[in-house]
Image (cartoon, rainbow, N blue to C red):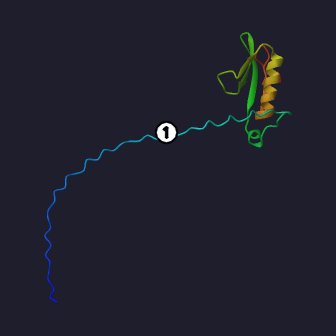
Amino acid sequence: MKETKKTVVKKEVKKEPKKTVKKETVKKEVVKKEAAPAKKVATKKEVAPAKYKDKARVYHISKNDENWQVKLAGGEKAIKLFKTQKEAIDYANSLVETQGGSIRIHSLKGKIRK
């Protein structure tokens, strides 16, 4: 048997550049609304956490025009305003129990009485 060699002639084929059209698909993310955490109901008075006991929070109770105000020492704005001094003292006591600190009560003339 005689081997014959085959010659392969390569044909040049012009390849046109493919036109690619990118379609941007926007995936819509499903956002699940998480249920709001239930409000914490305190049955008994909470004690100030240890991290607040070291800090010197001083709440000042003083007269402001017609109302009694509770301010944090060094603060410019009043935390809350009250009609009577007793209401302001009760509120400041609740802040001390939860946040830690102490209370300074000012008289009508501005002197610290307690």
- With 6 as the anchor, is 26 left or right in this view? right
Residue 60: image location, x then y, percent: 75, 24
- With 38 as the anchor, is 17 left or right in this view? left
How many numbered discs?
A: 1
Residue lying at 81% horizontally and 22% vertically, measured from the top left: 89
Please, is residue 107 above or below residue 26 in the view? Answer: above
Q: Kindly state the secondary structure of the residue where label 1 is placed.
A: loop
Nearer the observer, 36 or 49: 36
Residue lying at 29% horizontally and 47% vertically, measured from the top left: 20
Residue lying at 16% horizontally and 56% vertically, measured from the top left: 14
Residue 61: image location, x then y, percent: 76, 21
Please, is residue 19 above or below residue 109 in the view? Answer: below
Residue 26: image location, x then y, percent: 43, 40
Q: Quadrant of residue 90?
A: top right
Give the crowd class for mark 1: few <14, some 14-19, many >=20 residues within 10 Å: few
Q: Which residue is mark 1?
A: 28
Residue lying at 73% horizontally and 9% vertically, measured from the top left: 66
Q: Quadrant of residue 92?
A: top right
Nearer the observer, 109 or 65: 65
